[in-house]
Image (cartoon, rainbow, N blue to C red):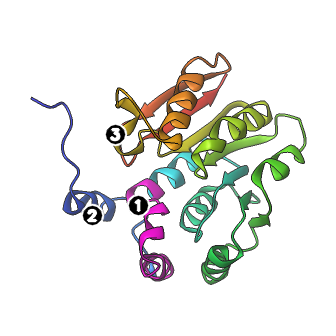
Amino acid sequence: MSRHVEVTDALADYAAVRGSWPDDEVVASLRAETQALGPPAGMQVDAAQGQVLTLLARLIGAQRAVEVGTFTGYSAMCIARGLAPGGRLLCCDVSEEWTAIARRAWAEAGLDDRIELRIAPALETLRALPATEHLDLVFIDADKGGYHAYWDELVPRVRAGGLLLADNVLWSGRVVAPAADDANTRALQAFNDAVAADDRVDSVILPAFDGLTIARKR
């Protein structure tokens, strides 16, 4: 017998509406606009995962957060809503087109005063940050080949007790393929091995969504 329930769309919807932050009008509109993009919409986290992001930010009282890979802004909205008063989220992305949707949604949600968007290669943005341990929470959800480099820049900048999150680390199950033949799968396999061996953090992979790494800085 499988130890895991099959998460159908109906079951995911059931869970999402029973969270503390169901979709409001702004979120529903953003999700609909994103779905209209077609295949790229698959890059958006689902509603239940968004609620997890909000909850984790609140649990640690996050004030300073970084997101690598913003797309149309839903995950950023979830993180920003979980920040403590006066908190700020820095978003890193390279697409003016997709983040234009994000900017509108953040303004409609009254969150644009706590989110800063920088359009540039993420490594440039991260390397320009102070080298001190000043971040409370980071979320990596961008190009898979860049995950390890982003991790290496972010871990030293996260405070003790802060969280590092990485999305898509199970890659639709392909990370357990005996002979991975694509660059993204190989990159995620290497990243997962590196995180597991990183003695600066305590980490788990949550086998939900598309795999979510949750790591706490020691």
Residue bearing the label numbered 1: 46
Name the N-terminal-most of marks 2 and 1: 2
Query: In whole angstroms, how far apart are the C-alphas of marks 1 and 3?
Result: 18 Å
Name the N-terminal-most of marks 3 and 2: 2
User: Which x, y percent locates residue 106?
Assistant: 64, 76
Residue bearing the label numbered 3: 173
Amino acid residing under circle 2: Asp
Residue 108 covered by magenta stretch: no
Q: Specify the label residue 13 is tagged with.
A: 2
For image coordinates 34% across by 39% down, the residue present is 173
Query: In whole angstroms, how far apart are the C-alphas of marks 3 and 2?
Result: 22 Å
For image coordinates 73% across by 32% down, the residue present is 152
- Magenta segment main secondary structure: helix
Secondary structure beneath label 3:
helix
Of tags 3 and 2, the one toward the viewer is: 3
Q: Nearer the viewer, residue 123 or 78?
A: 123
